[in-house]
Amino acid sequence: MDIRPSAPELGDTIAVIVQSNQGGTAQPTVQLNGQAFPVFPLEAGRFRALLPTSPLNSPGRYLVQVIGDEPTRNLAVWLKNRHFSVQRITLPPDRASIEGTPHEFERVATFKQLVTPERHWQVPFLRPSQGRVSTPYGVRRYYNGVFARDYYHRGVDYAAATGSAVIAPAAGRIVLVGRVRDGFRLHGNTIGIDHGQGVASIFIHLSRIDVTAGEVVQAGQQIGGVGSTGVSTGPHLHWGLYVHGVAVDPVPWRYGGIG
């Protein structure tokens, strides 16, 4: 059993690579502190599970277990603490009271839970915008002076000119297209890409959408334009990367940090 990265910290995606010592093809079960996660084959006798972590996890000792035809394997993983900065956001009166619609929340929630068997993605992921990073992953926030509890910035923001290109960071299928006119009042114009095997990217606040639902896109393909739709203080792209429904730090995926 191989754990990557070897010293994970809050927000990392932990890849568990399982090698069958007997060359078996039976899919094992991989658990993190008793919670099972999907496992997918790499090649004969090798499997991988992706275990997401976030700033809401507690740092400390976690137990990874591999259960299958062979004797159960146990490995302790120490999840390191990490400092996340605090940001104060002031929304204008006409946007501070905007609430999302049940329609958009339901569609986005369904999208984040997708686990499809085909793997489209390869590492390293590409940078989806050439804009500067205005808000990194994991930032905690005050909105109009009120601290947002159980909140962390679930992605990376890139500040860029309205209409500038947004590209797919990895290949996948477009499974979510949401527009302001259809009730996406909070997220604004939105695109969701299913990269496969529980990995998915969401892009919000777009000025335009250049793809259609069901379309398969390749890494580097233009999918839309930077905007400020929905609840936003200015033109930027928000890119969120989800692994099994948890918003993880996209940065390690851009630098090949996933096994």
Image (spheres, rainbow, N blue to C red):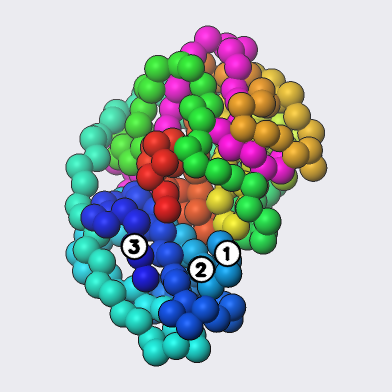
Measured from the top left, where is residue 192 in percent x and y? 64, 40
Is residue 98 among the parts visible in the rendering? no
Q: How many marks can you see? A: 3
Q: Which residue is mark 1?
A: 43
Circle 2 residues within 10 Å: few <14, some 14–19, many ≥20:
many
Q: CA distance from mark 1 to mark 3?
A: 17 Å
Is 24 or 102 nearer to us in this picture? 24
Element carrying mark 1: strand
Residue assigned mark 2: 46
Residue 24's spot in the image, x, y percent? 55, 81
What kind of residue is marked 3?
Answer: Ile
Residue 127 at x, y percent in the picture = 49, 27
- State the residue in front, 103 or 59: 59
* Residue at image point 28% right, 74% down: 75
Q: Is residue 29 left or right of residue 43?
A: left
Q: Secondary structure at mark 3?
A: strand
Q: Nearer the viewer, residue 44 or 95?
A: 44
N-term-proximal mark, 1 vs 3: 3
Q: What element does badge 2 sit on?
A: strand
Is 59 displayed left or right of 240 in the figure? Answer: left
In the image, which is nearer the foreground, mark 2 or mark 3?
Answer: 2
Inspect this view and state whether residue 256 appears: yes
